[in-house]
Structures are given as structure tokens and as C-alpha cells.
Image (cartoon, rainbow, N blue to C red):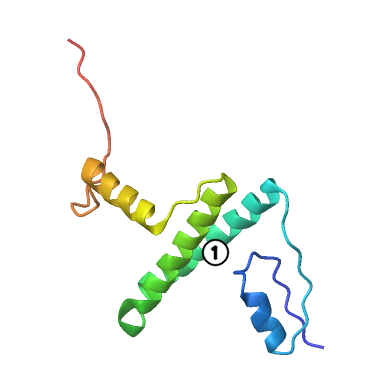
Amino acid sequence: MVEFVFDKLIRDKVLEDIFEDNFSADWEVLKRTDDKYNYLMKKFQEEVKEFEHALFNPKDGGYNILEEAVDIIEVLVSFMKIYSITPSKLQLMSKFEEKRRLKGRFDKWIVLKKVYKSEN
């Protein structure tokens, strides 16, 4: 018997794919908020690592970078759902643009080293 051990959060349709490929699986549905948070945090860390890997190994004109960015966004939206925040795509884009307008982007690559105030 071939066995793969994961213990990680998966997208909703992945289990269907496993069964369609004639595999069996042990799985559970998370109910407790702290379990959801913990598994999402592990998933977030996994996706950030995959994103970083894609940045240094771009494929298909950078398409893999976009794929990994989308995975990170999906995890962030799932975090919001834990706290009953369910923004629409329009709300997300609106907030995205608002933040850019108020705080700017990262286009100038500014690194803040220190802030101080002279005593008068």
C-alpha cells in the first residue's frame, strides 16, 4: 500500500479529485475556530514559501507567481470568514485602491530605518 501523510488544510474540491483518482483518504471537517485558525496559519506559511519559490523560479512568463499570489489571497479571505467578514470582490478592490490612495504603494522601495523628534 502507498500512503501519503499530509495533515494540512486543502481546498474544497481536492478531496473529490482524490476519490476520482481511486484513492481513499482519512479526513475531517474543522469545527472549532482555533483549529481553523491554526490550520489556516500553517496553510498561509506554506503558500508564502511557495510564492517565494515562484519568485526565484518563474515559469510560463511568471504565471506561477500569479497562481501563488492567488493562493495567498484565498487564505487571507478564509481568515476574514473566520471573523464573519465576507467581502465581495468589489469591496476587496475598493479597499485595495483606498489603501493605495491613502498610504501609497511600494513603487519607491523606501525602507524606514528610524524616526525621531528633536527636543526643543
Residue 104 in view, yes or no: yes
Q: Is residue 27 above or below residue 57?
A: above
Residue 48 in view, yes or no: no
User: Where is residue 27 shown, x and y percent of the image?
Assistant: 76, 69
Residue extending farthest right: 1
Q: Amino acid at mark 1?
A: Glu
Looking at the rendering, which quadrant does residue 84 occupy?
top right
Looking at the rendering, which quadrant does residue 28 occupy?
bottom right
As helix, strand or loop, the secondary structure at mark 1 comes to: helix
Residue extending farthest top: 120
User: Where is residue 42 shown, x and y percent of the image?
Assistant: 60, 58
Quarter occupied by the C terminus: top left
User: Where is residue 78 shown, x and y percent of the image?
Assistant: 54, 56
The residue indicated by pointer 1 is 46
User: Where is residue 19 shown, x and y percent of the image?
Assistant: 72, 84
Residue at the (61%, 75%) spot, across then down: 13
Looking at the rendering, which quadrant does residue 4 occupy?
bottom right
Residue at the (18%, 52%) spot, across then down: 108
Quarter occupied by the N terminus: bottom right
Residue at the (34%, 84%) spot, across then down: 60
Q: Nearer the viewer, residue 118 or 11?
A: 11
Q: Is residue 44 above or below residue 12?
A: above
